[in-house]
Each structure stands twice: as structure tokens, then as C-alpha cells.
Image: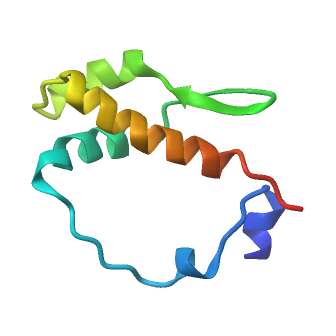
Amino acid sequence: MADAAAYGVILEPHHLAPAHYELWSDVVGAVRLFSQCATQWRATSGGVVGLDYGVLLQVAPVLGLTVDEQMLQDVGVMEGHAIEKLNRRTR
């Protein structure tokens, strides 16, 4: 945890404990796409600002996914939560 804190990442106990989640079938594609683009963040000196959607739209067909409005909304929800977590600072 100290290593993470050195980089400004706050790990909470629930981050370290094994978790079991049920993934709804209607969001599997969005989760796959979001996960595959995990290194495609745009950032400024102020922190992470969002995913590079140009890359996201290029990766989707490679995964056999068709991006529609609902998938973009689902990715956007995950992106919003990730931005919040990524931009937290240690106190």
C-alpha cells in the first residue's frame, strides 16, 4: 500500500480483498471494450481527463463489437468512475 501511496493512489481494504461480481450480459461488450482500452487515457498536468475515444472506436471492431449509443453510455459510466478514482490524491 505504501508503494501505491507514493504514486498518489489510495488503496482501501476492499481493493485488496478478493471480490466476486456478477456481470450483466447486456454490458459485457462495454466492459470488454473499456478493459481493452485501459492504457488509452488522456491526461493533463491536472490529472486524467478521459479515454481516447478515437482509439476506442478503432479497437471495438477488432473485438467484434459494434459501438452504439448504449455502449458509449455504458463505457462513459465506467470512465466517469475511473476518472474520479484515478484523480484522487493522498492526504
In this rendering, the count of numbered labels is 0
The correct choice, above or below, for 26 with respect to 4 in the image is above
Task: Give the residue at x 18% y 22%.
Answer: 68
For the N terminus, the image quarter is: bottom right
Colouring scheme applied when the structure was drawn: rainbow
Which quarter of the rendered picture does the C terminus lie within? bottom right
Q: In terms of image quadrants, where is residue 47?
A: top right
Q: Is residue 2 left or right of residue 20?
A: right
Residue for point 25% across, 45% down = 32
Q: In this view, does 4 lie to the left or right of 30?
A: right
| Residue found at the far top of this picture | 54
**Residue nearer the viewer, 43 or 26:** 26
Front residue of 83 and 52: 83
Whether 45 is drawn above or below 26: the answer is above
Q: In this view, does 49 lie to the left or right of 72?
A: right
Instruction: Please give the name of the residue rendered at 55% of the width and 29% of the height, measured from the top-left corner.
Output: 50
Instruction: Give the side of residue 44 with respect to residue 61, left or right.
Output: right
Q: Residue at x 61, y 82 (%)?
A: 13
Q: Residue furthest right?
A: 91
Q: Where is residue 10 in the image (x, y as percent from the top left)?
A: 72, 65
Whole-percent x and y of residue 8?
A: 79, 56
